[in-house]
Amino acid sequence: MEEKELIKELKKGKESAYYEIVNLYGNKLLRSCFLIIRDKNEAEDIVQETFIRVFKYIKTFRGDSSLYTWVYRISQNVAKDRFKNKMEICPYENEEVDYENPEDIMISNIYRELLRSALDSLSFINKQVLVLFYFDGFSIKEISEILGEKDSTIKSRLFRGRLLLKEALEKGGFHG
Amino acid sequence: MDKRDLLGSEIKNIFDEDANDIELSAKFIERVVRSREKTWKNKLDDFLNKEIEIPLAPAIVGLAALLAISILPKDILKNQEIKVINIGSSQVFIKDYKDVSKK
């Protein structure tokens, strides 16, 4: 079903359209939310709340953005509401690497684990932008539409997130 | 911002790896769709599509009772008043009075 048709059917309240939109975006939303908050149950709750809002407000959707972007905007608002208290910037923890036998460990594995740990320790807003940009493949403009922020704000959050990751990698002995 | 530089590629790989086995269950999807606010039309559709279970034994008993009422003569259970009229050595039994409609 094409997007226009799907929106029309959703506005009519057709059950098949509800299944279609959940099947279309449900897993993508769940994965993005999981990557940002690292809790599957919380991520599922956010997805459920997102779709409840989508069903409730679909009649107000005017088509200024794509349906995909609109659904994402709702999900990020839900996530933000739930994690308001976790939005402070958390300092990342240094990864402890076993340097006693470095030859036993693949360098790339250390690099990746270090990066994973640094990603986990990023704040909600920095991680959110990284997930939307690298995992979901949204452009800066689309992310600014989803989060309701200026392009420059998104660029700066992305830059900040990458900088924190680079610093963590440098502390772990990886340069460049 | 380049998505394909080394750091960007590594971030994407980690995200892909970590989210790989995260999936919504069919049960969850069902729950999400059912949680919507229903219109009157949806409610009516749901009602019409509802499965109704009828217990077999009471249904058979009920049906048999209904048949009995409609097929058997109404006066079968009535105590019939029998009048005996003796006429000489003969007896006339009168069981019931019937009205005969005039044409």
Image (tube, rainbow, N blue to C red):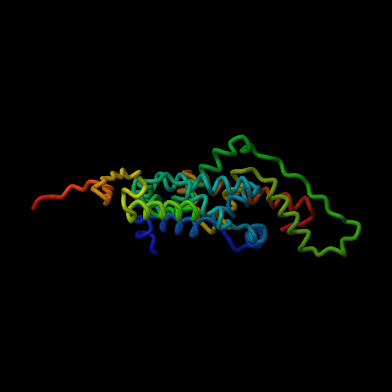
Nearer-the-camera pick, A156 or B87: B87
Q: Residue A84 appears in which quarter of the rendering? A: top right
Viewer can see residue A85: yes
Nearer-the-camera pick, A8 or A146: A8
Residue B13 x, y percent position in the rendering: 65, 62
Q: With respect to residue A15, does B78 lie above or below?
A: above
Could you tell whether A105 is left or right of B4 in the image?
A: right
Residue A111 x, y percent position in the rendering: 75, 59
Q: Residue B78 appears in which quarter of the rendering? A: top left
Could you tell whether B11 is left or right of B28 in the image?
A: right
Nearer-the-camera pick, B56 or B12: B56
For image coordinates 79% across by 63% down, the residue present is A107
Identity of the residue furthest to the front in this view: B88
Nearer-the-camera pick, A46 or A92: A46
Identity of the residue furthest to the top in this view: A85
Residue A69 x, y percent position in the rendering: 45, 53
Q: Quadrant of the N terminus of chain B?
A: bottom right
For image coordinates 44% across by 50% down, the residue present is A70
Identity of the residue furthest to the right in this view: A100
Q: What is the total number of numbered labels drawn onto the structure image?
A: 0
For image coordinates 41% across by 55% down, the residue present is B64
Viewer can see residue A11: no
Residue A171 x, y percent position in the rendering: 77, 50
Q: With respect to residue B41, does B5 lie above or below?
A: below
